[in-house]
């Protein structure tokens, strides 16, 4: 496998009884990629992420992370090896502030977990890392508010900050801006896109305007199988992709606007800009 590829899947199959949710999927995530996984409802996007992260065992196929076969590795051991997905914020974290939450995760990740309730007092290194993460994710001004009182957009930012605190090499995000107010989605994804180049990102997102402003690589899943894979330009101009998203017989204007292969705010795959296009359903 090329050094250029951080995460790859070969021949992945997942069957749930009679349903084949994943059909012989090959996927390569390149180092530093901003890779989007798109496809209609029920296409198998979440299932694929569940296979990659080890939440579900594949029926067939293999998964390679940084050149090592991880197909049978437990989920937490994949995290240790640098593959992290966003966590759902759960009740446990609600009484904590973003600063306390991050301090816990950072100190546990750094193996400094001893002072569970006072991690900040134990290490300047932890405090410094927390400060960085809070600033990077626009959480500094709310760092001392209990998480349950945070605006939803801030909670999603905190989820991603928590994932980053685990120092991922590959970050897997399943619809991270779902439920975030429209005005905050783009900023949130741009914050993810601006992560250091040594963090590769695989993102599931339905809003095509957001996808095309984020991604430098795209894979289209349909009925559990890869329909096609390519640059945003290639995807936007692919007739099969247009057919899947727009239905047959519909005349489609060009792909993204001229010279705006991955620029924000434009049309993509023939979808009008500012439509808030959501391919759900
Ligand atoms: N645990 C499960 N048991 C049985 N069937 C499942 C299970 N998980 C997923 N499926 C089925 O697998 C198919 C793919 O589902 P999946 O959730 O991966 O799609 P998705 O692309 O993430 O869809 P969405 O865009 O709606 O999130 C669907 O037909 C779904 O009903
Ligand atoms: Mg899904």
Image (tube, rainbow, N blue to C red):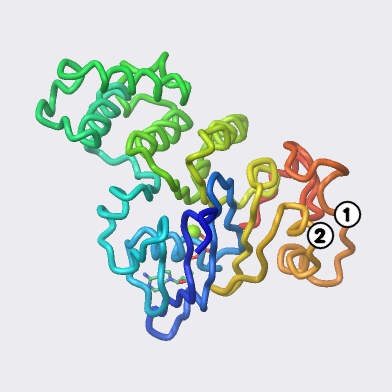
**Which label belongs to residue 254?**
1
Among the 4 quarters of the image, the one containing residue 186: top right
Q: Is residue 34 above or below residue 148?
A: below
| Residue 267 percent coordinates (x, y) | 79, 45
| Residue 173 percent coordinates (x, y) | 47, 48
Q: Does residue 54 appear left or right of residue 228 in this picture? A: left
Q: Residue at x 45, y 50 (%)?
A: 172
Q: Are marks 2 and 1 in contact (CB under 8 Å)?
A: yes
**Which label belongs to residue 94?**
none
Circle 1: element type: loop
Q: Nearer the viewer, residue 254 or 97?
A: 254
Among the 4 quarters of the image, the one containing residue 261: top right
Among the 4 quarters of the image, the one containing residue 117: top left
Q: Does residue 140 appear left or right of residue 26 in this picture? A: left
| Residue 272 percent coordinates (x, y) | 80, 47
Quadrant into which the C terminus falls:
bottom right
Q: Residue at x 33, y 71 (%)?
A: 57
Q: Is residue 6 above or below residue 163?
A: below
The residue sitting at the bottom extreme is 18
Q: Nearer the viewer, residue 145 or 84?
A: 84
| Residue 51 percent coordinates (x, y) | 39, 65
Find the distance from the CA under tag 2 to the CA under tag 1. 7 Å
Q: Does residue 176 appear left or right of residue 223 in this picture? A: left
Q: Residue at x 77, y 53 (%)?
A: 233
Q: Is residue 51 above or below residue 16?
A: above
Q: Is mark 2 within 8 Å of ligand 1?
A: no
Q: Residue at x 17, y 23 (%)?
A: 119
Q: Which residue is mark 2?
A: 237
Q: Does residue 131 appear left or right of residue 262 in this picture? A: left
Crowding at mark 1 (Cα within 10 Å: few <14, some 14-19, many 20+): some
Circle 2: element type: loop
């Amino acid at each position: 496998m090329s050094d250029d590829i951080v995460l790859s899947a070969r021949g992945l199959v997942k069957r749930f009884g009679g349903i084949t949710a994943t059909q012989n999927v090959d996927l390569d995530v390149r180092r530093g990629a901003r890779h989007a996984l798109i496809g209609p409802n029920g296409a198998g996007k979440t299932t694929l992420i569940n296979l990659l992260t080890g939440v579900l065992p594949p029926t067939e196929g293999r998964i390679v992370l940084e050149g090592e076969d991880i197909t049978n590795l437990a989920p937490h051991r994949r995290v240790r090896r640098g593959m992290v997905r966003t966590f759902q914020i759960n009740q446990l974290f609600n009484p904590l502030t973003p600063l306390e939450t991050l301090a816990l995760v950072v100190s546990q990740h750094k193996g400094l977990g001893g002072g569970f309730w006072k991690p900040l007092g134990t290490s300047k290194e932890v405090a410094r890392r927390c400060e960085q993460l809070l600033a990077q994710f626009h959480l500094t001004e709310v760092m001392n508010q209990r998480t349950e009182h945070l605006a939803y957009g801030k909670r999603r930012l905190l989820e991603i900050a928590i994932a980053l605190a685990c120092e991922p090499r590959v970050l897997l995000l399943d619809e991270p801006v779902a439920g975030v107010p429209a005005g905050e989605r783009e900023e949130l994804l741009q914050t993810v896109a601006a992560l250091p180049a040594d963090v590769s990102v695989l993102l599931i997102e339905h809003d095509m305007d957001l996808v095309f402003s984020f991604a430098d690589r795209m894979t289209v899943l349909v009925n559990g199988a890869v329909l096609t894979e390519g640059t945003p330009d290639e995807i936007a101009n692919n007739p099969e992709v247009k057919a899947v998203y727009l239905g047959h017989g519909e005349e489609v204007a060009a792909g993204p606007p001229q010279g705006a292969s991955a620029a924000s705010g434009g049309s993509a795959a023939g979808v009008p800009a500012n439509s808030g296009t959501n391919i759900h359903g």
